[in-house]
Every structure is written in C-alpha cells, then in structure tokens.
Image (tube, helix red, strand yellow):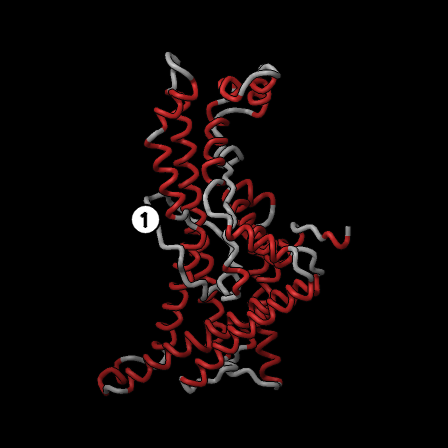
Amino acid sequence: MGALSAYSVGTVTPCDRKKTKLLHPVRHSSCFYRNRYQSIFKCRYIDQGLRPPCSQGDAEQHSEIVPANSDRRSHERFMDPYLRAGKRLDLLISGLGDGEDELLDSTLMEQSTETKLGLAVLAGSLVAGAAVLCCVLLDLDPAGGARLSIDSLIAAGIGLCAAVPLCVFKNALWSETAFQELPFLEDLQNKQVDEFRPILTNLSKPQAALVLACEVLPTVLIVLPAFTGGVSNMLDMYRQSFDGIREAVPETIPPLVALTLTSLLSGISSFIDQGPTEEEYDVIKDALDNADRYYRVMTGPGEDTMDAEDAFRKVALLWLARRQVAARFAAAVSSFEVFYLGLLWFETGDLMAPLVAAFAFNAVDFANITNRIPNESSQ
C-alpha cells in the first residue's frame, strides 16, 4: 500500500480521474470495490501543519462569547477568521460528488462477511487470470520462476529479509511522531482507511489477511511477470534484431528499462490518485474568485472583510499545497516499492522473493488500517 507525501508546492495541472489503478503493490489493484472508494477527503487545515497562529484557547474564548440565541451569521462574526475559513472550505469540499460512490460504499459495508470475501476473491482471481493470460500470450512464465522447490523457499526467505527495512519504514509512517513531523501523512492514511473501510468493516484479522492476499498476489503477478516481463521481452527482441545494438547494449539493460518504466507509471498513477481532483480545483478557484463578495454578504455592509478574505485564501492555498505535497510523496514511495520488488525478482530469478516482500510490508499498512476500523461484530 504505498505510503504517502511530496516535497515542493509548485502548480499542478488537474488530471483526469478516470485513470488505471494498476502498478502499485496494493492500492492500485483492479479490484472493483477499491475503484469505488473515492470518499471525500476531509480537509485538516487547523491541525499541526496547517493551523494558523490561533490557539485552541482563543477559539474557545470566541465560542464562549457568542450568545446562545445568535443566528449563524452573527455567530461566525465571533469566530476566528481562520476557523471560519476552514469551516467554509470543509463545506465546499464535502459538497462535491453526486453521492454514487458513498452509496456504493455504504452498500458494500452492509454486506455479509461471506459476500465481501467472495467479492475480494472474485476480483483478485480476475486480475490474476488476466496476468496469466498475458504471460501465456507473450510466451512468458506466469509464475516468474517460482516453483515448489527449495530454491523458491530460499527466495521467499530472501524476500522476507529484504522487506524488513520497508516494514520498519511503513510502521514509522503510522506513528504519532511522523504525524507531527509530516502532518499530511495523517490525512493520506485517513484516506486509506476510508477506502478500505467498506470491505474491511466487521472482518476478523484472518479474513482481512485474505483480502490482503487478494490485493497483493494479483497485483504482483500483473506488474512483474506480465507487464515488466512483457516489456523486457519486447525490448530484448529489438536488441537482438540488430547486430550493432546487440553488441553495444548489455542484456541486463532491457529488464532495467522495463522496470524503470513500470515504476514511473506506478508513481504517476499514485500521484493522480492522491492529488486534488479537477472538481476540487474548480470549486476552490471559484470560491477564491468570489471571496470578497461572499464575505461582504456574510458580514453585512460597512464591515471590514479583508481579514476573512485573506484567511480563506491562505487556508485554501495551504490545503491545495498539502494535497500536492502528499501526492508527490505517494508517487515517490510507490515508484520505489515497485522498483525494489522488481530488483528482488531480477536478482533471485524467483517471484517468491518480491511476493513475500510485498505481503510483508503491505501487511504493516493493513494492520494499522484494520486497527482503525471498528469491528461491530465483536462489540
């Protein structure tokens, strides 16, 4: 599941959300129930990383001096301008969408355990079947060199050992210290929780492990043997077609080029998935363009609205910047994970190594996600 973030704030062009969710060891599998998890990303502009210079005590004082019978407009006049800006932006973002995704999520959440597991297995089987079919058509080994042998067992051990640093890194990303140092991590991981909540609600730990298997196994099959192996095979055929190229280009170059291409595509997919949507851009742009008129209407004639307008602009721009930073970090982690797994496969010649590694470090994310999802059946 990839972790999540990015490093500069520059301008990002809105991307088409109808993207292919492949190429990430967990988050971008083609399981259809995952493609429906586009829950609205709740903004957090008043927490550690984006909170303006207004203390919680100030906010409480503002709320205390508001009369109990005051209407909404007079109440907002007593609020800190940054709190009011955050409230307005939250309302704007939460109002996006037509409700279809939320309805599907709610429907899936209410399904029985057997139905959820059946859907997970069916979706995973379809993706794995597509990967095997691609390998057969391209005359590749669908198992990626894995066999029921001692060598594959050794490769699995190598993969488990190689996954230890990533497991430690992934677990650290879920810590309170990481949230304090990199505030966008909490937002992104809350989004992961929201995406998996419908399928994992009321599932036990073993059942959640089955869902993890249905995410990881098909994705590793289609990313490494099918896609990376297919691209590598075509590049190698081109290399061998010309004597000059065959002599000048080592045989190790085509696999590395194919793996680099795969990891870049994975990063792009993750970047699009985590970045602001075009609809969010449009709504925020319109709100910024009309901020002066909105606050003149809300505060009444003759009152100074510059503080409120300035607060809203800062909050909105910080929210966009935070999402872009998160998208860049997610892209970097996703690309690294795919490249790391591919190197394990090339070095061992056995798919068991990257498969076990992917299971290990994605299990860390899954464990933290399931801990945040209440199990109603056990309550």
Kindly indicate the quadrant of the structure image that contains residue 363.
bottom right
Closer to the camera in the image, 328 or 155: 328
Could you tell me which residue is drawn at 38 percent across and 14 percent down? 301
Locate residue 149 relative to residue 376 in the image: left or right.
Answer: left
Of the pair 269 and 154, the residue shown nearer to us: 269
Residue 232 in the image, given as x and y percentages of width and height: 37, 78
Q: Residue furthest right?
A: 379
x%, y% of residue 74? Answer: 51, 17
Say if residue 182 shows up in the picture.
Answer: no
User: x%, y% of residue 149?
Assistant: 61, 86
Answer yes or no: is residue 180 visible: yes
Looking at the image, residue 192 sits to the left or right of residue 307; the answer is right
- Please tell me whether residue 284 is drawn above or below residue 13 in the rendered image: above
Q: Is residue 85 above or below residue 3?
A: above
Measured from the top left, where is residue 309 in percent x and y?
38, 25
Q: Give amino acid for label 1.
A: Thr
Q: Helix or strand or loop: what does disc 1 sit on?
A: loop
In the displayed structure, 311 sits above or below 47; it is: above
In this view, the residue farthest toward the left is 244
Give the class, few, some or many, for how many residues have Cα within 10 Å of label 1's Cα (few <14, many ≥20).
few
Residue 67 position by quadrant: top right
Which residue is under mark 1? 13
Q: 352 or 35: nearer the eye?
A: 35
